[in-house]
Image (cartoon, grey):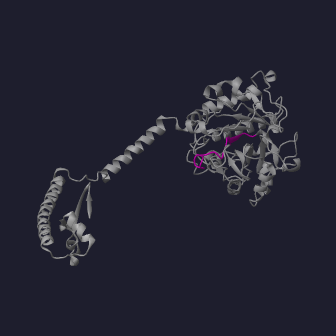
């Protein structure tokens, strides 16, 4: 029984039983109803129903002919439809797919270059309060002030050192020539120079990596301060390493304010520093740790425990005798193999208020210039960028740190700030403004410019001036 709309058509099932499904034979509804009431073999052969059976047989024959004709017309109509409207082809061919991928790639590149993607991402990243300026942390109770009244902004300090042959360090695959100790001399060599050994630690200048852990190579995808790692920077002549310490769910990381956004593992960094010092036994490294306490408390003893996990690292840590005590010569550190000097700042605590002996509170020993310069004009403004904002009051510190970068990190700005001309002028201006030669020169994007080379020649200049003064 097949229902078509409201019309019921009955088919002779004998044709289906023979497997001829396509040629089903329609019969009358009355004949079908009678067949449903009783089997055909029970029909009584009377003249009346015999005539009816003959009529039904005739109708079945006519319906069969009509059905065959209808099927033939349906087949012809389907064939005509296929000719007039052929089936749609698959248009996603290999050339079309390749062209689409190229368009998507071009769109992504244009979006990345034209739209301020990094600024948008940084805008929605968690924000943390920067250290106070002027700095008022417990380790530096007295606020630093520039001693301009005594020196009138001109202390006669000149760090305008011309570099006859600027040595590119962008690849950092080997130690540059200006950092190599002479191989034909048995004299003591310190940080790549014989002259440096006669300088005290607080008379020496150190090219310093600002936020050294924050590098593109190290997995910091946005807002990084350097392209290349701190390990490569040490090879290139950088001897000061500033690292931000975070407590990320009970695990210490060197991160840039945000846990797991980009991080370096302390033990890994300490092991690499130790390997460098073993490979170059004439070098001294300064480590400056900054606490980031927003994600969890920083206990400096915990970081010290991380150091002790690296065999041999603790043995190289220098222990200072205390505030007001003289600093040793660089040569003395080399001889004693105490070639790692460590500082900490920006909070954190120590177990039972007893900090590890090698850890020195940075701003009790160091005065620092303004660290928030938005552009090159800010850096060129001596009164703004050279003023002391953190450290001991009245410039009583042993060290002087000059920040030579803009915020947020800008590689194009660093390509200018790290040049010989800009750097010499800035160091000279800040030195005369405060009456003291810089010790820590903080930079971003260390692989641009000549910072480590200029610092090396500045140390030679300082050693020559000291020798001349002693001979008088």
| Residue at (61, 28) in percent of width and height | 376
In the image, residue 314 sits, relative to residue 365, either above or below, namely below
Q: Is residue 184 above or below residue 25?
A: above
Q: Can you see residue 79?
A: yes
Q: In the picture shown, does residue 352 fall above or below 48?
A: above
Residue 5 falls in image quadrant: bottom left
In front: 79, or 243? 79
Q: Residue at x 20, y 52 (%)?
A: 86
**4 over 123 or under it: above or below:** below
Q: For the C terminus, give its image quadrant.
A: top right
The answer to whether 291 appears left or right of 173 in the picture is: right
On the image, the x and y values in percent for residue 32 come to 23, 67
Q: Where is residue 311 in the image (x, y as percent from the top left)?
A: 75, 61
* Residue 451 % position (x, y): 63, 39
Q: Give how far across and how far down residue 434 sits, in percent.
A: 76, 27
Name the quarter where the N terminus is drawn.
bottom left
- Residue 120 horizontal side relative to residue 139, left or right: left
Measuring 16% from the left and 50% from the top, which residue is drawn there? 84
- Main SS type for the magenta part? loop
Q: Which residue is drawn at 79% across and 50% down?
A: 333
Q: Can residue 156 be seen here?
A: no
Q: Nearer the viewer, residue 54 or 161?
A: 54
For the residue pair 446 and 66, the one nearer the viewer reads as 66
Stretch in magenta: 204-220
Left or right of 89? Residue 413 is right
């Amino acid at each position: 029984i097949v229902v078509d709309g409201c019309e019921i058509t009955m088919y002779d099932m004998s044709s289906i039983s023979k497997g001829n499904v396509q040629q089903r034979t329609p019969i009358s509804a009355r004949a079908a109803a009678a067949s449903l009431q009783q089997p055909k073999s029970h029909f009584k052969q009377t003249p009346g129903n015999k005539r009816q059976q003959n009529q039904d047989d005739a109708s079945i024959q006519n319906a069969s002919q009509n059905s065959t004709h209808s099927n033939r017309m349906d087949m012809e109509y389907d064939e005509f439809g296929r000719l007039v409207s052929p089936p749609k082809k698959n248009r996603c061919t290999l050339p079309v797919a390749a062209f689409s991928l190229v368009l998507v790639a071009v769109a992504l590149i244009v979006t990345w270059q034209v739209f301020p993607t990094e600024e948008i991402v940084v805008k929605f990243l968690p924000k943390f309060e920067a250290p106070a300026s002027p700095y008022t942390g417990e380790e530096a109770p007295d606020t630093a002030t520039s001693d301009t009244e005594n020196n009138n902004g001109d202390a006669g300090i000149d760090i305008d050192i011309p570099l006859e042959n600027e040595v590119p360090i962008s690849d950092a695959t080997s130690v540059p020539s200006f950092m190599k100790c002479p191989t034909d001399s048995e004299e003591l060599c310190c940080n790549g120079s014989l002259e440096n050994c006669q300088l005290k630690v607080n008379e020496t200048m150190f090219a310093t990596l600002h936020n050294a852990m924050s590098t593109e190579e190290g997995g910091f995808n946005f807002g990084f301060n350097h392209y290349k790692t701190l390990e490569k920077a040490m090879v290139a002549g950088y001897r000061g390493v500033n690292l931000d310490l975070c407590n990320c769910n009970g695990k210490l990381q060197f991160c840039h304010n945000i846990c797991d956004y980009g991080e370096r593992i302390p033990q890994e960094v300490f092991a690499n520093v130790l390997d460098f010092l073993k490979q170059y036994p004439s070098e001294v490294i300064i480590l400056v740790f900054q606490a980031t306490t927003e994600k969890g408390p920083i206990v400096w003893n915990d970081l010290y425990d991380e150091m002790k996990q690296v065999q041999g690292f603790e043995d190289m840590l220098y222990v200072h005798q205390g505030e007001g005590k003289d600093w040793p010569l660089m040569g003395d550190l080399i001889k004693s193999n105490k070639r790692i000097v460590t500082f900490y700042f920006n909070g954190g605590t120590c177990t039972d208020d007893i900090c590890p002996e090698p850890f020195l509170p940075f701003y009790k020993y160091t005065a620092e210039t303004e660290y928030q310069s938005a552009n090159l004009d800010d850096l060129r403004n001596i009164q703004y960028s050279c003023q002391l904002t953190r450290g001991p009051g009245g410039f009583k510190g042993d060290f002087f740190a000059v920040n030579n970068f803009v915020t947020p990190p800008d590689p194009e700005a660093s390509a200018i700030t790290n040049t010989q001309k800009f750097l010499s002028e800035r160091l000279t201006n800040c030195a005369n403004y405060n009456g003291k030669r810089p010790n820590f020169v903080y930079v971003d994007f260390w692989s641009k410019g000549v910072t480590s080379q200029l610092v090396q020649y500045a140390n030679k200049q300082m050693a020559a001036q000291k020798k001349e003064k002693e001979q008088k």
